[in-house]
Image: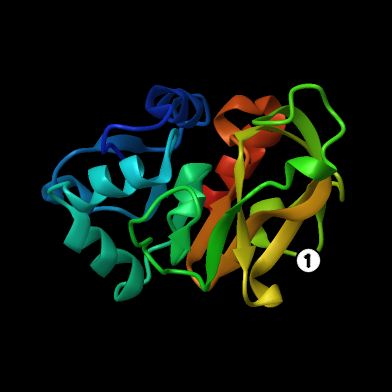
Amino acid sequence: MISIIDYGLGNLKAFINIYKRLNIAAELVTTKQQLVKADKIILPGVGAFDQAMSKLNNSVFYELFNEMVLEKEVPVLGICVGMQMLAKSSEEGKKKGLSFIDGNVKLLNVSKINHLTKLPHMGWNNINIIQNNPLFIDFDKSPLFYFLHSYYFVANNKKNIISEVNYGEKFTCSINHNNIYGVQFHPEKSHNNGIELLKNFSSL
């Protein structure tokens, strides 16, 4: 069962629709009873870091979520702000992150962006896959994904970085440490490449 954390943020129905088309069991999770059945967990996210952390921290399944990921080692995929929440902290807010992967979240450097509208980084961009990873099985080295963000994850351990993207400067756009994965782009908005990535996650 793919369990999609419903804590009030994210494009939840889009994930359900994709997995339904793939004939893969998935459900929106709002209770502990649902989450405990998870084989894989998706942590979606949109909006501001502190808002997302507050909603997750105040949810009924916060402690169980941590237990499932850290102790039972259930694979988890953080998406957009969901990826940023895996860090220790963010320049966007004051709340502590989950600290699942060693790193912090920083604001993109607008001085290096050659666009009239500098932030957010919005639209399609080619990523660069820098190491083999189960998320990107059968992908070419520079697939196209959809982005919408102004902050990015700075991983303290380069071994955790699995892909990068360039928007003014090069930065990390997907990470992995053991059973914990994160992508800055939106696979649920990225058509065939996003569908393939979500399928790969379900097969971990």
* Viewer can see residue 75: yes
Amino acid type of the residue that numbered disc 1 sits on in the rendered structure = Gln
Name above or below for residue 64 compared with residue 141: below
Lateral position of residue 96 relative to residue 130, left or right: left
The residue at 29%/53% (across/down) is 38
Question: Above or below — where is 29 with respect to 88?
Answer: above
**Mark 1 burial class by Cα count in 10 Å: few <14, some 14-19, many 20+:** few
Front residue of 133 and 107 = 107
Secondary element type, mark 1: loop
Left or right: residue 119 versus residue 38 is right
Instruction: Give the residue displayed 82% in from the left and 50% down from the top.
Output: 169
Estimate the x, y position of residue 68 in percent, counting from the top left.
28, 65
Instruction: Name the image quarter holding residue 3.
Output: top left
Q: In this view, does 174 lie above or below 8?
A: below
The answer to whether residue 153 is left or right of residue 29 is right
Across and down, in percent, residue 167 comes to 80, 41
Residue 177: x percent and y percent? 55, 71
Colouring mode (rainbow / by chain / secondary structure / one colour): rainbow
Q: Mark 1 points at which residue?
A: 131
Q: Residue 150, located in which quarter of the rendered image?
A: top right
Q: What residue is rendered at 50% in x and 70% in y?
A: 101
Tally of numbered tags: 1
> Considering depth in this image, is 88 or 117 the residue closer to the camera?
117
Observer able to see residue 36 = no
Q: Residue at x 62, y 75 (%)?
A: 156
Residue 124 x %, y %: 76, 28
Q: Could you say which quadrant of the image residue 11 lies in? A: top left
